[in-house]
Amino acid sequence: MRFFAKLYQFLQSQYLKDKHREYMRRFKIDPTARLPYLENTWFHGNITIGKHTYFNGGRIVTGPNSKVVIGEWCAIGHNVNIIAWTHDPEHPTGPMDKRPTIEKDIIIGNRVWIGSNVFIRESVTIGDNSIIGANSLIIHDVEPNSIVGGVPAHLIRYKNGSQQV
Ligand SMILES: CC(C)(COP(=O)(O)OP(=O)(O)OC[C@H]1O[C@@H](n2cnc3c(N)ncnc32)[C@H](O)[C@@H]1OP(=O)(O)O)[C@@H](O)C(=O)NCCC(=O)NCCS
């Protein structure tokens, strides 16, 4: 039993090293950014992640004509979904190559803290120094220095001052 556990751990760590190498090659991830839960992370498309930001797992998805840009020093919690490419509500189902899709950029500023289980929809911009509460649904832009939360998210309050790193 111990042999198989060790073998599994070895293969898992090799797989994660390979995946990390591949993600650093395929996406514009600063070398100081961290993806500590790579086994629970899935990226697709045009993705930029800035210096010292960490992403604790979830999905980031763009289409061929959209992008997700995440700034510096962001703290992104567990199971966060940032989805810039989605269904057209008028034609949401049917063969993948025949149905229309919608894609719009998502831009996340610097020093943003995103709580766990947040969903961020296409076209949203999140301002610097803001906080997104756990389990929130972000369908509108978020002002800099604000704290928002809920489904859909609403303003809870503004922060007292802008945070310096
Ligand atoms: C958003 C957050 C930072 C606010 O913290 P806070 O300033 O201490 O806020 P409070 O707990 O005093 O709550 C203030 C108000 O916001 C509401 N609120 C707090 N978090 C909320 C959330 N996630 N969604 C909706 N409303 C929220 C509270 O219900 C309260 O409303 P009320 O005054 O009408 O009762 C915190 O609640 C949060 O979600 N943190 C993220 C935790 C997390 O995901 N950690 C993962 C590790 S990275």
Image (tube, rainbow, N blue to C red):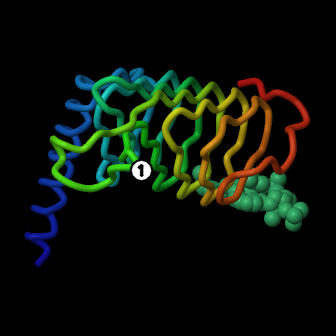
Q: Residue furthest right?
A: 160
Identify the residue at horizontal 29%, vertical 52% (top origin).
39
Amino acid found under the numbered disc labelled 1 = Pro
In the displayed structure, would residue 86 be above or below residue 151?
Answer: above
Q: Secondary structure at mark 1?
A: loop
Q: In the picture provided, is 122 more to the left or to the right than 124?
A: left
Q: Residue 134: x, y in percent? A: 63, 57
Identify the residue at horizontal 57%, vertical 24% (top origin).
72
Q: In the picture provided, is 74 more to the left or to the right than 66?
A: right
Q: In the picture provided, is 129 more to the left or to the right than 34?
A: right
Q: Residue 51: x, y in percent? A: 51, 22
Q: Residue 84: x, y in percent? A: 42, 37
Q: Quadrant of the C terminus?
A: top right
Q: Quadrant of the N terminus?
A: bottom left
Q: Residues within 10 Å of mark 1 (few under 14, many from 20)?
A: few
**Disc 1 residue lies near ligand 1 with CB under 8 A:** no
Q: For this rendering, which residue is in front, 7 or 143?
A: 143
Q: Quadrant of residue 162?
A: top right
Q: For this rendering, which residue is in front, 51 or 137?
A: 137
In the displayed structure, would residue 97 be above or below residue 143?
Answer: below
Q: Quadrant of residue 27?
A: top left
Q: Give the labeled residue for mark 1.
A: 89
In the displayed structure, would residue 150 be above or below residue 148?
Answer: below
Q: Residue 18: x, y in percent? A: 17, 38
Q: For this rendering, which residue is in front, 11 or 58?
A: 58
